[in-house]
Image: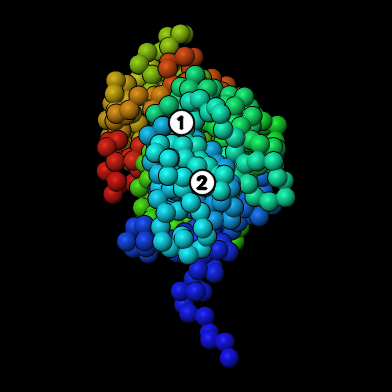
Amino acid sequence: MNALPTKHEIQKEWARRSNLSFARYHFPAREGMPLIEGPHHRIIGQTLDRVHAGEISRLIITLPPGYTKTEMAVVNFIARGFMLNPAARFIHATFSDDLARENSDKIKSLIELPEFGELASVGIKSDTSAKDRWKTVQGGGMLAKAAGGPITGFRAGYMDKDKFTGALVVDDPLKPDDAFSPTKRASVNKRATNTFRSRLAHDRVPIVVIMQRLHSDDFVGHLLTGGTGEIWDHLDLPVIIDQSADYPKEWTHGRRVPHDLPDGPLWTEKHSAEEIEVIKADAYTFASQYMQRPVSAEGALFDMSGVHWYKPGEEPEIDYYRMYADTAQKTGERNDYSVIELWGKAKSGPAVLVDLVRGKWEAPDLEKNALAFWAKHKGKIVRGLRVEDKVSGTGLIQSLKRKGIPVEGIQRDRDKYTRGLDAAPWVATGQVWLPTDAPFTESLRYEMQTFDGLGTGFDDQIDPMMDAIADMLGGYGSFVGFGIPKGRR
């Protein structure tokens, strides 16, 4: 009678069968502790299994920083590829030669572990000394380079289309600091068509791209909008899962990889709902690196395709209202308008612009119009009026307080460009609702379409809009340090 397999034998068998089990099996020997798993590791592992099995040849995985993407999709994926085929050939590219060499050395060290030797016999050639380029005795090998550097004399995979023969693995090809450089983005993006594909032994050799989003035109953005003309299977894992969210229409060359992760935080052990709220303070970074929905920060800051336009009768249920005002310093023909806006915070989350009044008013008329606008909406639950506390705004605050209006002054301690960057992601992701046919709609639309934060053109209606977004949706560190104590929101 055959003896039952031991626990170790079962673990070995599972390690041969899947990427997650492979990573789980080797992690204690490499790091001296068990692999701390999140629900996303299972999904990533299952998707990478499909690459090894030949079901996916072009894969993009986007997820937040610190979620072990390199561990899963570079180190363990490539090492398991050598387990499956010791003659496999891999090219690995990332944003720097140093990091590429470090990752390559981790893969080599994993293969040399006794635990790996229990799964497969893969020998590293003894004459291999360079960390960025080494070969197996079975004819396979590894080349690791910076994404922007030369990749010559080596190809990923080889001419056998009936089995897995290797892959090109690109991990964070662009540094966050380089994301706003058009030249550096273009250089990396160009390599997708001019270099990377030419380094494949044949078209079915897989390419795996895994990164945090940094810019609307980063490497992933380039691929998803047709940069190589290929369709990419896309495993999109934002820090907050929302299964009802639509896949962006502009990602014409992406094909969403479905998964069964529940709505809510992607990995609560890494970032709880409360910790995610803290991250939201830097709205641009949150939208791009954490939610994988970057907006461009060049030229006009607002992506108008993300605005949620509503018609009369389509307003969501409002939890409370608040007014925001921006007053002009002078009232001449060429000077700014004074603007007062009424916003509602919807119970479902978005900030909704309800009404707006603007004009070039001297102090008495400014007070008169502010009082009239307040009276117009006295039937609503308006929690007060917030006014920039400078020049004419200071006088308005004082006069309205004498009339019993709950008014507060705010100090804007950030420049318009930075405030625009904070507000832009909320506009781009549909969290800002604007009326389709109000008297002020066209002028507001024009201001938003041309707003660059650099003082070009008019932005009278934009300033209080950005105040409302910051207050109601969480920008500027949730108004902490913005002149309004957090407890008084």
Which of the two residues, 284 or 317, is positioned nearer the viewer here?
A: 284
10 Å crowding of disc 1: few (<14), some (14-19), many (20+): many
Rendering coords of residue 379 (x, y %): 48, 46
Residue in the image at 49% along x and 14% along y: 457
Residue in the image at 30% along x and 35% along y: 482
Does 433 appear above or below 271? above
**Outermost residue to the bottom:** 1
On residue 50, which mark appears?
A: none
Residue in the image at 37% along x and 34% along y: 98
User: If the image is split into quadrants, where does the N terminus sit?
Assistant: bottom right
Which of the two residues, 376 or 122, is positioned nearer the viewer here?
A: 122
Q: Secondary structure at mark 1?
A: strand
Question: Is residue 482 rendered to the left or right of residue 240?
Answer: left
Disc 1 marks a residue whose amino acid type is Ala
Residue 277 visible? The answer is yes
Disc 2 marks a residue whose amino acid type is Thr
Question: Is residue 477 rendered to the left or right of residue 260?
Answer: left
Q: How many discs mark residues in the rendered view?
A: 2
Q: Which residue in the protein does label 1 denote?
A: 146
Q: Which residue in the protein does label 2 denote?
A: 136
Residue 91 in which image quadrant: top right
